[in-house]
Image (tube, rainbow, N blue to C red):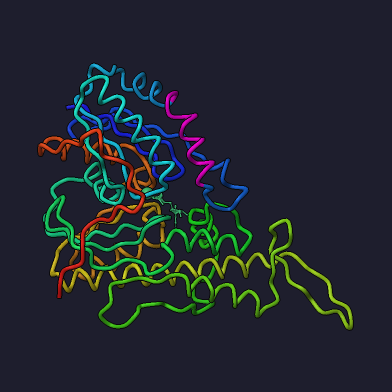
Amino acid sequence: MLILGIETSCDETAIAIVRDGKEILYSSLSSQLRIHKRFGGVVPELASRAHLESISPLLKEVLRGAKSSFRDMDGIAVTYGPGLVGALLIGVALGKSISFTLRLPWVGINHIEAHLYANFLSHSNFKFPLIGLVVSGGHTALFYMKELGKYELLGRTLDDAAGEAFDKVAKLLGLGYPGGPIIDRVAKDGNGKRINFPRPYLGKESLDFSFSGLKTSVLYYLRARGWSLSARGVLQRRIRLGRRSAFFGGGAQEVKDIAASFQAAVVDVLVEKVMRAAKIKKVKGVLLGGGVAVNSLLRREMRKRAEEGGLKVYFPTSELCTDNAAMVAGLGFIKLQAGERASLSLNADPNLSLGSREQR
Ligand code: KG4
Ligand code: ZN
């Protein structure tokens, strides 16, 4: 069964064709990084326009790349939430039109669930129940997965998402956008123990997250040491020279140490909460997904702690951690096979959630 997957929830226009929920025939995306970079974050209106411009050429490219035509498709899967409404609408409109014109079944896909499903494209033989952690630019959520499709929300961020914190701290440090990959790289030469940034565990039992205080701590740390960003976005420090003062750049090692110390704090909290959840729910395996799951320290620490605790831990490949349409097409196959069908009245839902909290 060939499924065409479409993903436009944020700043990547992505299309893929996947066979039987597993085999990626072709997956491609058009990144809007260049458009949003100078604003230091995604500008929703620009994102929708860019999706509109790139989606048709991308569709042609993917069909050609998979050596397929519309006639070979058995169904369509489209991300319909959560995300930016104007961005989601582009993908949903395309999915509906193809479905209507070619009389193909279609399903709406929850972007968060697709991030978890990305693991099923990279690995097999999962033993449920599992703990799932989605960490991306827009989401940080921890789930108990009884099986694929059954989720209990154990915890989520009360403010910033983990990826958002990476992006904001990179901006404070004048490192550029998107912050996650840059901090990951810069931190490799930094001392993560130099600054003991707060670990917001939110109490012994809580499985929720909070990252905005951590970001503020980085800001206060910089201010206390006289660092500020120049108009050109370069981190500089005012040095007093007698009665006068002057700005000096540099301080590269300190920036690396701050980046490494911030990253260590985020990773500590994420790993600790996953381990807590696994213990509370008595599971034997953990899935991670979303852009932050690319992070090298997170992968290393999670593997180490999981091994000590006798847990199996799964990460998708890097390309399948960040936004892509293969995870959408793959999950679409599972849903279509289970008989799920969307009607043409299904619309983009920017606030779509996944799972609910168990009543206590
Ligand atoms: O899953 P994704 O592509 O989009 C959303 O659904 O949000 O995640 C993007 C986020 C960005 O915040 C980016 O900075 C972060 O993932 N990210 C990383 C790394 N690579 C991407 N964060 C930490 N370390 C990385 N290596
Ligand atoms: Zn995502």
Left or right, 32 with respect to 295, comes to right
285, 31: nearer the viewer: 31
Q: Main secondary structure of the magenta part?
A: helix
- Where residue 298 appears, as percent x and y from the top left, is 37, 62
Q: Pick whichever, 144 or 246, lies toward us.
A: 144
- Picture coordinates of residue 221 (x, y %)? 60, 77
55 part of magenta stretch: yes
Q: Residue at x 23, y 23 (%)?
A: 73
Q: Is residue 294 inside the magenta stretch?
A: no
Q: Quadrant of the C terminus?
A: bottom left
The residue lying furthest to the front in this view is: 345
Residue at x-position 54% and y-position 64%: 169
Please indicate whether residue 118 sits to the left or right of residue 293 in the image. left
Q: Name the spot of residue 208 as percent of width and height, x first.
A: 31, 71
Residue 156 is situated, as x and y percent measured from the top left of the image, at 32, 66
The answer to whether residue 123 is above or below residue 267 is above
> At x 13% / y 69%, what residue is drawn?
282
Which quadrant does the N terminus fall into?
A: top left
Q: Judge from the rendering whether residue 92 lies leftward or rightward of residue 48; answer left or right.
A: left
Examine the image and state in which quarter residue 140 appears.
Answer: bottom left
Q: Quadrant of residue 222?
A: bottom right
Which residue is more in the foreground, 193 or 66?
Answer: 66
Q: Write the start and end of the magenta stretch as one range.
A: 44-57
